Amino acid sequence: MAVLGIVLIALAVLFGLGVSVSSGTATKLEVFGVHFGVSVTTVFFLGAIAGAALVAGLWFLKKGLGRDLRRRKEMRELRAKVTHGDDSPELPAEPPTERDDEPAALEERPTEDHRPH
């Protein structure tokens, strides 16, 4: 898959370079009633930017909806536990920690090397 991605990226770059080098024709572009005189190369790259923005927007939408779905699923599971009388949520096992009333053991480490050089 990675090789296919690299090949597609290389083809897109080569196609973009081919369009920009071989097209010198100017055209008129109308956006929201405003006319612009632009080259074909500019139109091509504006389209590429619009396509990239569309792909990024769809990716953000997918990520946001996935997060919301996971959160709703977790809330549903927690409500089901409370409804069925199981109030104790499952907590991950943690290693035992030192108690506050017991002094922590300190390790003595030399801060400087006192060997002759």
Image: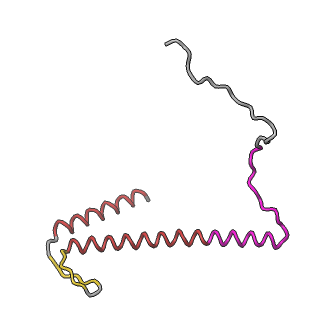
Q: Residue at x 42, y 57 (%)?
A: 2
The mark total stands at 0
Name the outermost residue toward the right.
85
Picture coordinates of residue 111, whole percent (x, y): 58, 24
Indicate the quadrant where residue 38 lies: bottom left
Give the image's coloring scheme.
Answer: secondary structure
Q: Residue at x 85, y 69 (%)?
A: 85
Query: Is residue 20 shown left or right of residue 104?
Result: left
Query: Is residue 117 shown left or right of residue 72?
Result: left
Q: Is residue 16 above or below residue 36?
A: above
Is residue 90 one of those drawn in magenta? yes
Q: Which is nearer the eye, 113 or 36?
A: 113
Picture coordinates of residue 89, whole percent (x, y): 78, 62
Q: Is residue 113 above or below residue 67?
A: above
Q: Identify the image quadrant of the N terminus.
A: bottom left
Picture coordinates of residue 68, whole percent (x, y): 60, 71
Look at the image and give the residue range highlighted in magenta.
Answer: 69-96
Name the outermost residue toward the top.
116
Q: Residue at x 55, y 14 (%)?
A: 115
Q: Which is nearer the eye, 58 or 32?
A: 32
Query: Is residue 113 shown left or right of residue 42?
Result: right
Indicate the quadrant where residue 37 lies: bottom left
Name the outermost residue toward the bottom.
33
Q: Residue at x 28, y 73 (%)?
A: 46
Q: Is residue 112 above or below residue 93?
A: above
Is residue 20 one of those drawn in magenta? no
